[in-house]
Amino acid sequence: MIKLAPSILAADFNVLGNQINMIEGRGVKYLHIDVMDGNYVPGISFGTPVIKSIRKNTKLIFDVHLMVEEPIRMLEDFKDAGADIITVHAEACSDLPGTVEKIKSMGLKAGVSLNPETSLDKLDSVIKNIDMVLIMSVDPGAGGQPFIADSLQKIKDLKEKADKVDANIDIEVDGGIRHSNVMDVLKAGANVIVAGTSVFGGNILENVDKFNEIFLQYEEIV
Ligand code: DX5
Ligand code: ZN
């Protein structure tokens, strides 16, 4: 099942609750929440108070992407704020298996993210214990960047690697995804599609509908 995960980083925070209601009313199930700490990545986005506040307004699955150094320090805070899935960066964890274990022990789904230059080998110690891998198709830190084309091969390689060890993982892709390139991302093997600019830029309802149409087209050809 393919899921669209709109990233609120590109939303209008002045009317954030309304925009979340709009996408939820259009059949979206995931909400991608980009947390940046000003350390792992240069910018700061928002943290637990914002997540706690929007949690009251929606039943969407909160897919929290922590672009944070040593996220093990604050996993409980994000659980309490309402996270359903917590994704950490392999590059940002000195103890990746321990960090994953902690997310799982809190009863949440665990994801591990890899930057464009990070090898899939980084997953070896955790691939059997995680629910999702997030392939960054831009350098983390900002929305609106162009998709890095090499990511397609990485997605294919990840799919093969996961199948080989019988790991039942979702493959999420994040950065630069547009209506024009999402079919290629699906064909490569992704099933969770993050989109910021291409959902919240312009007409939100039309943007979501257009993604849903492409997902249907994809499901017809496979
Ligand atoms: C980048 C974030 C992305 C970003 C995607 O650091 O992780 O989720 O918001 O934005 P677009 O879809 O605009 O590339
Ligand atoms: Zn993200």
Image (cartoon, rainbow, N blue to C red):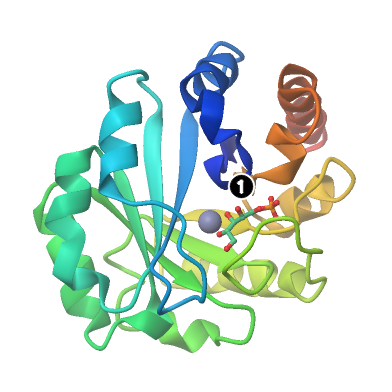
Q: Assess mark 1: CB under 8 A from ligand 1? A: yes
Circle 1 residue: 194
Q: From the viewer's perspective, is residue 190 above or below residue 150?
A: above
- Circle count: 1
Q: Residue furthest front?
A: 14
**Residue, x 11% and y 51% (percent of image)?**
106
- Which residue is rendered at x = 68% and y = 69% of the image? 138
The amino acid beneath tag 1 is Val
Which structural element holds mark 1?
strand
Q: Position of residue 212 (x, y in %)?
A: 72, 25
- Residue 14 falls in which quadrant of the image? top right
Residue shown at 53% from the left, 34% from the top = 13
> What residue is at 18 percent from the left and 59 percent from the top?
75
Side of 10 where 134 appears, left or right = left
Residue 64 in view of the camera: yes
Residue in front for this viewpoint, 203 or 214: 203
Residue nearer the viewer, 40 or 117: 40
Image quarter hosting the N terminus: top right
Give the residue furthest to the top. 25
Placement of 221 over or under 119, stated as above or below: above
The spot of residue 65 in percent (x, y) is: 42, 56
Q: Measured from the top left, where is residue 184 in percent x and y?
A: 82, 53
| Relative side of 114 to 188, left or right | left
